[in-house]
Image (cartoon, rainbow, N blue to C red):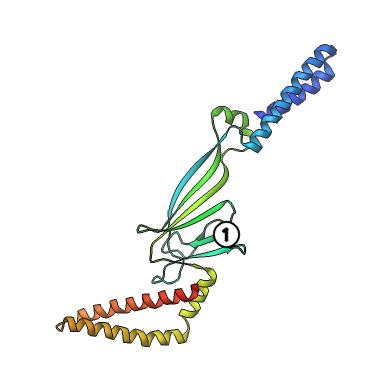
Amino acid sequence: MIIISVIIAAILSFAFYVYVHNRVLSNTLTAVAVIALLTSIFFMVKNDHDHLGMQKVTETSTQKIYSASPSKQMPMMIYQSVGTADKHRVYVYKTSANTKKTSHTKAKITTKNVVKRTAGANRIVTKKVYWEYKSTAAKFWFGLSGNGHTYLKETNTIYLNQSWTVLSTTQAKQLQKLASSKSFKAQQKTAATAYVKKQVMAAMMKNPTMSATQQKQVTKQALAAYQAQAMKQLIAQVKK
């Protein structure tokens, strides 16, 4: 409506000045129309620049997330730094356990990302802030300007289990390269065999009557524990 008011006031100013022949009446009406024009322009600028008649509204949403890592035994959150100062990061994840497609946070200066550890589900809680009209009257006057539901900023709070590792894309590539190298695999095979054998012998000393099924269970647990420990050391290496 404020835009229509500007147009009407501009037309009336011209009409009163040109077509009203009584000079006193013409000048009076023209002055009133010009004042209305300037007032309308003033409020239109205040709405556009200072968000007159607007208020900040926050919308919150929660998205369960899954690791973008190709390894199920090595869940991780991968990020890419935006700029050279590492002040802004884009985090990469999946929204489904079965999809190959990855999603990521926005690479905008208006987007803030915070990573927190949790014992609950891995998720992203997004709080988006918009400019909305304060009232029906404000929407009536400024609705045509298109400022309603204008995006302002957002904050993503990323909740991750302790089992997840946070690595940059560079570190993730380096980790993958090291883990898939022949020398690392050979070394781990030898070390894992020795570790598992030691754990099984220790378990059998505690329980000499251990069945074959129980031995397999101990072997499985020992192997998983060793692999987790080896990967933890490898991650610490790439983070240096």
Give the side of residue 28 with respect to residue 94, left or right.
right
In which quarter of the view is residue 206 placed? bottom left
Give x and y (percent) for residue 221.
28, 76
Can residue 145 be seen here? The reply is no
Using the rendered image of the protein, determine whether residue 160 is visible from the camera's viewpoint: yes
When the figure is inspected, residue 226 is found, relative to residue 155, above or below; the finding is below
Residue farthest front in this picture: 240
Looking at the rendered structure, the kind of residue marked 1 is: Lys
Crowding near pointer 1: few (<14 within 10 Å), some, many (20+)?
Answer: few
- Residue 32: image quadrant is top right
Left or right: 130, with 8 as reference point: left
Q: Which residue is drawn at 41% across and 71% down?
A: 74
The residue that disc 1 covers is 87
Q: Which residue is drawn at 51% across and 61% down?
A: 91
Residue 43: percent from left, percent from top: 67, 30
Q: Which secondary structure, mark 1?
A: loop
Residue 72 or residue 221, whichever sits in front:
221
Query: Which quadrant of the structure image shows residue 107?
Result: bottom right
Q: Residue at x 63, y 36 (%)?
A: 50
Q: Is residue 166 above or below residue 202?
A: above
Q: Where is residue 190 in the image (x, y as percent from the top left)?
A: 37, 88
Residue 213 versus residue 114 in the image, above or below: below
